[in-house]
Image (spheres, rainbow, N blue to C red):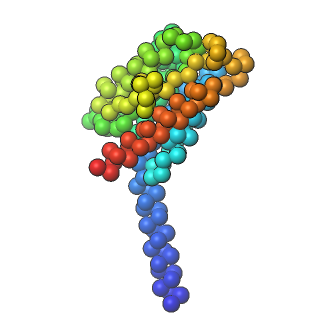
Amino acid sequence: MKMLSKYFSIFFLSLTFLYAANKPLVLITYYSAGGHTKALAKAVSEGAESVQGVSVKLLKIKEVQPKDILTADALIVGSPVYNANIAPAVQRFINSWPFKKQPMKDKLGAAFVTGGGISAGEELAQMNILHSMLIYGMVVAGGPKWTSAFGASAITEEEPFKKTKNNGKISLHFQEKGRALGKRIAELVLKMILQ
């Protein structure tokens, strides 16, 4: 009887490992100069982690390895807004993605950004990321509501959202938008993989 119990334990442990290894992977990566984009990335990650059945990896852009991109089923990229564009480090990261044989094709993609002021280029920066994802053949998605149609964004330097200078905090309102984006992408990638 002990031997049978041991075999069942090994069998169920093996099944657990296989299940964990086969979960869709959501890779959330970002560049953050002042901490605001990092704070929003954390919120996006929390939203994705709230969905059972997916694995979530949160990395700074400089920590991402080629295998991370290739094994991810969904890729959510974050950037601060630089003159209505993405940060140069984020553009270099996107330019480094593999292009030959289209290994990015049909991966799910999304974007989040942080900008200083209201109407200071957040949507343009999000679209820069999404346009690049489309070039690579990715399937892109925005947030769950029309108020975050291009993804998640946060305002950091204009009232009423301005926090103490350079402390890297963002308003709870924008944290919730980040969580909603992460949750939506995790749910979508599950639907895509399971169908």
Task: Give the residue displayed 48% in from the left and 12% down from the top.
Answer: 121
The percent position of residue 151, horizontal first and vertical second, equals 45, 27
- Corner quadrant of residue 60: top right
- Corner quadrant of residue 167: top right
Placement of 46 over or under 87, stated as above or below: below
Q: Residue furthest left?
A: 101
Task: Give the residue displayed 44% in from the left and 38% down from the top.
Answer: 184
Q: In the shown orientation, is residue 13 left or right of residue 130?
A: right
Placement of 139 over or under 154, stated as above or below: below
Task: Give the residue displayed 61% in from the left and 21% down from the top.
Answer: 33
Q: Residue furthest bottom?
A: 1
Task: Give the residue displayed 67% in from the left and 24% down from the top.
Answer: 168
The percent position of residue 125, horizontal first and vertical second, equals 45, 17
Count of numbered circles on the image: 0
Q: Is residue 185 visible?
A: yes
Q: Is residue 88 visible?
A: no
Q: In the shown orientation, is residue 126 left or right of residue 2?
A: left
